[in-house]
Image (cartoon, rainbow, N blue to C red):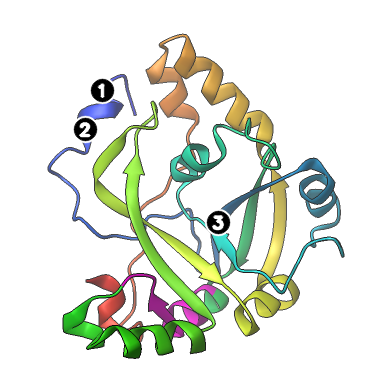
Amino acid sequence: MNEEYDDQYAGQEPRFRVRARHTERTVTVYQAYGPGIGRAAARTGRFPPSWKRDRMTWIKPSFLWMMYRCGWGTKPDQETVLAVEITRDGFLWALRNACLSHHVPALHGDRAAWRRQVREAPARVQWDPERDLRLRPLPHRSLQLGLTGEAAARYADEWIVGIRDVTPLAARIHSLVRTGDLGQAAALLPEEPPYLLDDEVPAHLRA
C-alpha cells in the first residue's frame, strides 16, 4: 500500500464483498471493549464472566470499520481493541443462519415476515460503508455480523481460536494518520483479501 490508499479503491471494488484476514481454518474479526473485558479476554483467550452473552454482539472482519466504530480505541468502553481469530466453520455457520438486518421487500415480502426472521435468526448481517484511513466512507461496503442466542454462545465457547490485544497497533496507525503519513499507516494495516463465500451461504446475504 502507498500514499494513494485513500483513492485506490474508487470504482474498483464490488459494492458488497467480505474482506477479512483469513487462513484455510480461521477468520479474524474485530471487537472493542472496555479494559475490564478486553484485557481479560486477551490474557486468557476467552471472554470473562462479565461478558454478557445474552446480548447481541457484533463482530467485524474489517479493521478500519472497527476503527471507525471505536474511534481508534478512544471511545468510552471501547478502549481495548481485540483481534479475535475464530474458526472458519463457525463463521460460515453464522452466515448460513443469518438474516439481513434491514428489510428488502423483494427478498422478505412484507415487514412482518422480515421481523419474524429477525426474531428467529441467531445471526444478522449488516453491510456498512467501508472506511479509508481518515475513516471517510468508501463506495463499497463491509460486513458486520451480529450474534445472539445460540450464535453468541457458540462464538464464546466453541469458535474462538485466539484473542490478541491490537490496541497498540490501532494507536500507532492513528498517530501516523494524524501526522499525514498515510503510506506508513497503510503499510501497518492487516491484510484483508476477499473472502469468497461458498455456495452454501444464502445468496440473499451477498445481494
Q: Which amino acid does label 3 sit on?
A: Val
Provide residue 2's location: percent of width, then percent of height.
32, 23
Provide residue 100's location: percent of width, then percent of height.
36, 74
Q: Mark 2 points at which residue?
A: 8
Q: What secondary structure is marked by label 2?
A: helix
Please give left or right for residue 132 compared with residue 91 in the image. Answer: left
Pointers 2 and 1 in contact (CB under 8 A)? Answer: yes
Sooner in the amino-acid sequence: mark 3 or mark 2: 2
Pointers 3 and 2 in contact (CB under 8 A)? Answer: no
Q: What stretch is highlighted in magenta?
A: 91-102
Mark 2 vs mark 1, CA separation in Å: 6 Å
Residue 29 falls inside the magenta stretch: no
Q: Mark 3 points at which residue?
A: 29
Mark 1 vs mark 3, CA separation in Å: 26 Å
Q: Name the residue under label 1.
A: 4
**Image quarter hosting the N terminus:** top left
Out of 59 and 118, give the one closest to the viewer.
Answer: 118
